[in-house]
Image: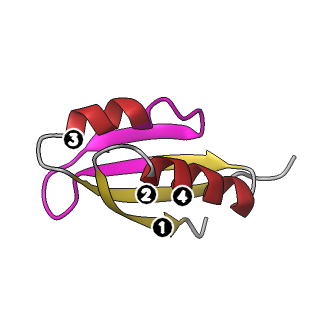
Amino acid sequence: MEEKIVAYVIMIVEVGKEYEVLEEVKKFSEVTEARVVYGEFDLVVRLEVNSIKDLERVVMGLRRIKGVLRTATLISAT
């Protein structure tokens, strides 16, 4: 069995929309953890996917959530 790709998506969202976006993020089956955080970013999302193609599909879906302003994706090395 192939090892899953683990990635983290850090998100900036509209002010006051953090928890609304969080609830939408949690609807993705590939999301294994999602948290509202304080500081420069608003949410950190952990994903597990089978391929880069799947990663692209999920990240594009996250970007389409109403209230999301910007994302950055970090692919785990291990």
Name the element at disc 3. helix
Q: What amino acid type should be assigned to the residue bearing mark 3?
A: Glu
Sequence-earlier tag: 1 or 2: 2
Return the mark for residue 18.
Answer: 3
Q: CA distance from mark 1 to mark 2?
A: 6 Å
Which residue corresponds to mark 1? 74
Residue at 59 percent of width and 40 percent of height: 30
Q: CA distance from mark 2 to mark 4?
A: 7 Å
Q: Residues within 10 Å of mark 4 (few under 14, many from 20)?
A: some
Above or below, 60 relative to 66: below
Instruction: Please state the horizontal and vertical placement of residue 74, each as a whole percent of the image.
Output: 48, 67
Q: Please name which of the two marks, 3 or 1, marks the residue nearer to the observer.
A: 3
Name the element at disc 4. strand
Residue at 53 percent of width and 48 percent of height: 61
Which residue corresponds to mark 2? 9
Magenta residues, as a range? 25-45
